[in-house]
DNA sequence: GGTTGGCACTCTCGCCGTCCGAGTGCCAAT
DNA sequence: ATTGGCACTCGGACGGCGAGAGTGCCAACC
């Protein structure tokens, strides 16, 4: 009983099951794959695969379906990411080219990914803490309040209202603001905000005492924006695809939808992949630490301008998914988004 | 057979059905409401109501359920919006107070509305075309490209990259930009962008020929931002509540989820209400023009700082929903968001 | 030893007839 | 107009049955 053939059988089972979503029996396998052996032999192999925990039978007289471990072996050893056709590549590229701003890029990306994979797509906004500062702007808005606007090279624009104690809608105030603008932009421009934190802290010290407090408030606001939960954002599309899954999802799609609404969870899952260095990550069924998503698989990867990863994206689907195609789509979309962002 | 009692019967049917989600028969009605008449009388009334098309029987020997028309009568004539308890009001207020920026306000609002109503909440971002301009900022970003940032009094920040033909990252360029900033802000500041369009158009004419082209590009970008589809945005929460509905939704939740992903559709539905002048709008079942949502009801209203409506919000749920409570929640949330935005 | 055909066995699923109960519609009486 | 009574209808649950798919095992074969 060759190890090699056993794995071929596993691959055939995964492929058939993904396509038909019905347990596959020894006979059905022979019809669709010419393995060159008889049904009895396949049965023996299947028994062995079941022994190893790679496949399982829902009940005695049904075919087998892959287990999470079975899919894992399939993904790691039995499949290769299937490249996208040039036509698809062009379609991706041209769709994303048309975006007018970052929101639009993210929106188009997530919809594109959902429609390519016919699954739920998840796209994270470029992380503030990993983006460089393009510009800091200060806009006085009635009374002692100041609007601080932070623009990053990835196109994100964050705003925060700070109370600076004094009314700046005056000629004097305007002069103060001009100084502050220059100083703050000099301290942060072109750098990752986190790296600029010591320069940023020294800015107030260099200024006139009268202005110092205002400046401190602004600096605090900038630093806060990195810490807050809202620093990271994530966008979904294609949730309707969950309903197409048919007899999938052990119970129903309820828990999955709930988990997807927990953006914090999604961010953590996308985040870990970004740290892994840009390769595709596949999380299958129970490999997922979050209960609500344990009947699903995630395929994720990082993206970003150049080699710096600034965020993650991916899809969530049934464990019974077409991994090669999905992985190809995720990778291709990440590549193109990165290219657009680099622009 | 008094008209009055018949309506009381209808009300009782709606209330029971909303609570139990099972067809209600004449006997069950008597147990739960003391109508002071016998089952036979109720049956007669029910027959009459069915004749009028306000209720229907799923099959011969089952109880009755309200039709869309029945709910309509219930909402218009038989129910009153039930006020929220002071404790709830405080909870709403304090949750929304904590928001740090517009994104945060919208995010909190939509989640709050979803959890209050246990339905799908929909919140529109303040419409650009109905907000006043707080500030226009111009940031040169390498090469001939200029980032135009538009900040509105409702807190929205829109950005657009325009190609102005000449490199502005020079001392000369900076002077040009300073002039432009002053002119543009003078022309638009504090006004609704749409109203400022003639002033805006005249700005380039007043300037030096050299600067005129740059200015025209910027003005065009500003005006474009009003037209584009992205001008309006909408955010969802609580889609998982669709699964809780149980035996609802004629077929399944698939079409509903699909319709909810069509933000354009949602915007149109929210938009029409905003024009109606601030009262609550209820759209029941087939009253809804979009096929995917015809098994649902929507309760929507407008909100905005002061008396100007700048956007809409609401919920989408099964036609079998608790209208009085839902309407109360939608109205209360709209009130509080408006208050926060006025700040 | 691995492979194969044969065979008995096991379960699920769909089908069908039966039964039960909820709920109705109608009618005659008040 | 309201009421109690009564026959009737229909959907859903229950249970038995048969078909079919698929298995595991075994003895034979290369």
Image (cartoon, coloured by chain):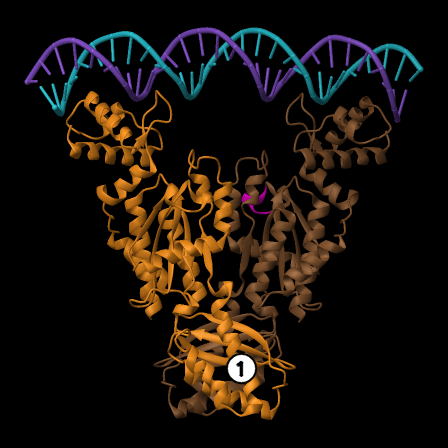
Chain colours: A orange, B brown, C cyan, D purple
Subunit ID for the residue under disc 1: A
Q: Which residue is drawn at 43% across and 39% down?
A: A244
Q: Residue at x 51, y 41 (%)?
A: A254
Above-or-below relation of A157 to A290: below
Q: Where is residue B90 in the image (x, y as percent from the top left)?
A: 71, 59
Horizontally, is A259 left or right of B343 in the view? left
Say which of A273 and B128 sits in front: A273
Q: Residue at x 62, y 46 (%)?
A: B118
Q: Position of residue B122 (x, y in %)?
A: 58, 54
Residue B213 visible here: yes
Q: Quadrant of residue B156?
A: bottom right
Give the structural element (helix, strand or loop) at label 1: helix
- What is the crowding at mark 1: few (fewer than 14 residues within 10 Å), some, or many (at least 20)? some
Residue A101 visible here: no
Horizontally, is B6 left or right of B156 in the view? right
Say which of B337 and B209 sits in front: B337
Q: Position of residue A225 (x, y in %)?
A: 50, 70
Give the quarter of the figure containing the N terminus of chain A.
top left
Q: Quadrant of residue B88?
A: bottom right
Q: Which portion, as a residue range, is magenta?
A: B289-294
Residue under pointer 1: A216
Q: Does the magenta stretch include residue B160?
A: no
Q: Position of residue A321 (x, y in %)?
A: 34, 41
Q: Quadrant of residue A57?
A: top left
Horizontally, is A10 left or right of A23 in the view? left
Give the quarter of the figure containing the C terminus of chain A.
bottom left
């Amino acid at each position: 009983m060759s190890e090699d053939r056993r794995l071929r059988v596993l691959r055939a089972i995964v492929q058939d099951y993904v396509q038909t979503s019905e347990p596959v029996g020894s006979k059905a396998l022979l019809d669709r794959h010419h393995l060159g052996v008889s049904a009895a032999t396949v049965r023996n192999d299947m028994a062995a695969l079941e022994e190893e925990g790679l496949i399982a039978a829902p009940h005695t007289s049904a075919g087998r379906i892959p287990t999470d471990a079975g899919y894992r072996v399939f993904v790691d050893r039995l499949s290769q990411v299937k490249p996208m056709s040039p036509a698809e590549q062009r379609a991706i590229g041209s769709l994303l080219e048309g975006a007018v701003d970052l929101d639009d890029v993210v929106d188009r990306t997530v919809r594109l990914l959902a429609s390519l994979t016919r699954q739920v797509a998840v796209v994270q906004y470029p992380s503030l803490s990993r983006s460089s500062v393009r510009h800091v702007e200060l806009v006085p808005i009635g009374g002692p309040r100041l609007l601080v606007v932070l623009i990053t090279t990835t196109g994100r624009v964050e705003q925060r209202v700070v109370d600076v104690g004094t009314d700046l809608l005056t000629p004097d105030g305007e002069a103060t603001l001009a100084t502050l603008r220059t100083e703050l932009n000099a301290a942060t421009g072109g750098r990752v905000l986190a790296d600029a934190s010591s320069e940023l802290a020294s800015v107030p010290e260099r200024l006139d005492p009268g202005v110092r407090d205002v400046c401190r408030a602004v600096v605090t606001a900038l630093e806060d924006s990195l810490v807050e939960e809202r620093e990271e954002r994530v966008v979904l599309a294609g949730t309707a695809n969950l309903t197409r899954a048919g007899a999938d999802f052990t119970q129903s799609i309820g828990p999955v939808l709930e988990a997807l609404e927990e953006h914090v969870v999604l961010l953590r899952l996308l985040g870990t992949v970004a740290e892994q260095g840009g390769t595709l990550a596949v999380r299958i069924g129970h490999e997922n630490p979050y209960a609500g998503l344990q009947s699903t698989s995630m395929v994720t990867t990082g993206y970003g301008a150049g080699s710096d990863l600034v965020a993650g994206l991916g899809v969530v689907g049934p464990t019974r998914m077409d991994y090669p195609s999905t992985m190809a789509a995720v990778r291709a979309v990440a590549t193109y988004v990165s290219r657009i962002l680099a622009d």
